[in-house]
Image: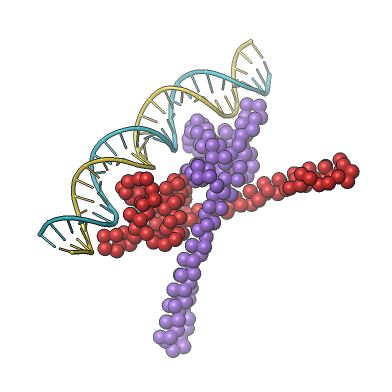
Chain colours: A red, B purple, C yellow, D cyan
Amino acid sequence: MAADQLDATFAALADPTRRAILARLAAGEATVTELAAPFEMSQPAISKHLRVLERAGLVTRTRDAQRRPCRLEARPLQEATAWLENYRTYWEESYQRLDGLLDELRAVEEQSRGAESDEGER
Amino acid sequence: MAADQLDATFAALADPTRRAILARLAAGEATVTELAAPFEMSQPAISKHLRVLERAGLVTRTRDAQRRPCRLEARPLQEATAWLENYRTYWEESYQRLDGLLDELRAVEEQSRGAESDEGER
DNA sequence: CCATTTCATAACCAGATAGTTTCATAACTG
DNA sequence: CAGTTATGAAACTATCTGGTTATGAAATGG
């Protein structure tokens, strides 16, 4: 919940490569080279991304011989979601307003015609 | 849902000043100077933050005389949340694992003693 | 119409980011 | 032990970021 934690988490998520890495890790542990394979990018570049993810607490690394398997840590994602949840009522309210507007339009239409077909629905 | 949109949204959220601005806007529209007031920062700095938020679609501006009232747009927050929701099962699963571990510990404790009080619970 | 308010833009700067290539280290494998 | 694999680290570069000050433009209000 600390601001720095949110800073680091959101900053880490702001890069498509890193989001792809997280998506891959959601399917299970993977080594650095496995993670690097899908990208047209040097291995050190991936290592840097992993360091960013690690500092944000989104990834932890263990040891397996020469390999350093990475594992997803979902906790910061949960905290980021918790922060965003504060705004849920806000966007739901927007939908309510939209719904209200649509209802209103529908009512006006209804009123300004006899008994035609209801094309234009939805 | 486009990657660029998520990039922009998460990048915008990665700054505490900008998150504070959004929190303020959740309470209702505000002008640039109103938004700048709480910060020890020059007005152009706030204008830059607003431009970042605007490009991310998190803020829209209208016109009222010399003032440019800002309004929160929650849609990108909803999309970011939707992305994060994909990982909800993952962190819930972690809790399950934690719960399982606790259950296991409790069982072992239970088994390794007679009928003492259950301190250490939870 | 002149002064004020509100805001944006420009130019600049320091530090962070994202990538590169090259080299080093560590642990397996034969 | 020699070679290979997996990864980290260093040095360099270009671009982005977040801030500054100084200036300019648009609209209001007397």
> Can residue A35 be seen from the camera position used here?
yes
How far across and how far down the image is residue D12, in percent? Answer: 26, 35
Q: Is residue B109 above or below residue A70?
A: below
In the image: residue B25, left or right of residue A9: right
In the image: residue B5, left or right of residue D8: right
Q: Residue at x 42, y 58 (%)?
A: A25
> In front here: A94 or B63?
A94
> In front here: A24 or A104?
A24
Q: Is residue B25 above or below residue B104?
A: above
> In front here: A11 or A41?
A41
- Residue extending farthest to the right is A114
> Can residue A8 be seen from the camera position used here?
no
Q: Residue at x 54, y 37 (%)?
A: B55
> In front here: A54 or B19?
A54
How far across and how far down the image is residue D4, in percent? Answer: 22, 56
Q: Residue at x 50, y 30 (%)?
A: B44
- Residue extending farthest to the bottom is B114
Q: Residue at x 87, y 42 (%)?
A: A113
How far across and how far down the image is residue C17, in percent? Answer: 39, 42
In the image: residue A61, left or right of residue A105: left
